[in-house]
Every structure is written in structure tokens, then in C-alpha cells.
Image: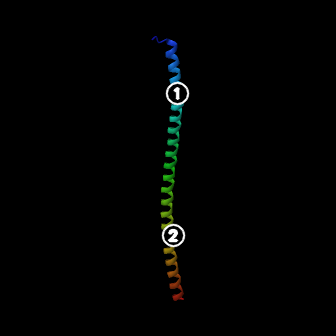
Amino acid sequence: MEVHMGDILFQLFTLGSLLIPLLITILIIIFVIRIVRRMERRADERLKLDKENAVYQQEQMQAIKELNNRLTNIEIMLKEVE
């Protein structure tokens, strides 16, 4: 059985035409996975910042309550002095 150069080229072309869509599909999947991971990282960073902001706001509210208590005590003392 003889193998001609044309037969080999045809087989290589056929193999290539089957592999190219597969490679493109794999590249698209890799690209989508990278995008999803990047979005997850950004969401995690946003969540971390939101938590830090909530803690900071609670600290500020506590400080405001303490200042209000001190101010109330000072007002009471001033009324007693009058």
C-alpha cells in the first residue's frame, strides 16, 4: 500500500480542522475562568473593605455615644451649680 504526499497532507488538514475548534474552546474556557476568578477576588476585596468600614462606623458611633454621655453629665453639673 502506497502513501502519497497528498494523502498525508489531507490527513494533517483533517486533523487540524478537528483540533482548531477544540483549542479555541479550551482557550475560551480558560479566559472565562480567569475573568470569574478576577471578579471573585474583587468581590472578596470589596467585602473586606465593607467589613472594615462597618467596624470603623461602630467605633465612631460608640465614641459619639460617649461624648453625648459626657455632655449630658456636664449639663447636669452646670444646672446643679446654678
The amino acid type, in three-letter code, at marker 1 is: Leu
Which residue is the extreme one toward the front? 1
Q: On residue 18, which mark appears?
A: 1
Q: Residues within 10 Å of mark 1 (few under 14, many from 20)?
A: few
| Residue in the picture at 52% in, 47% down | 39
- The secondary element bearing badge 1 is classed as helix
| Residue in the picture at 52% in, 80% down | 72
Q: Which residue is mark 2?
A: 61
Q: How far apart in space, not on screen, are marks 1 and 2 (Cα)?
A: 65 Å
Q: From the viewer's perspective, is residue 82 above or below residue 18?
A: below
Give coordinates of residue 44: x percent, y percent.
Answer: 48, 53
Which of pointers 1 and 2 lies earlier in the amino acid sequence? 1
- The secondary element bearing badge 2 is classed as helix
In front of the other: 26 or 33: 26
Q: How many marks?
A: 2
In front of the other: 76 or 19: 19
In front of the other: 5 or 32: 5
Q: Residues within 10 Å of mark 2 (few under 14, many from 20)?
A: few
Q: Are marks 1 and 2 in contact (CB under 8 Å)?
A: no
Give coordinates of residue 74: x percent, y percent.
Answer: 51, 81
Say which of marks 1 and 2 sits in front: 1
Give coordinates of residue 37: x percent, y percent.
Answer: 49, 45
The amino acid type, in three-letter code, at marker 2 is: Met
| Residue in the picture at 53% in, 82% down | 75
The quadrant in which the C terminus is found is bottom right
Q: On residue 39, which mark appears?
A: none
| Residue in the picture at 50% in, 24% down | 15
Give coordinates of residue 33: x percent, y percent.
Answer: 50, 42
The colour scheme used to paint the residues is: rainbow
Q: From the viewer's perspective, is residue 10 above or below residue 63?
A: above
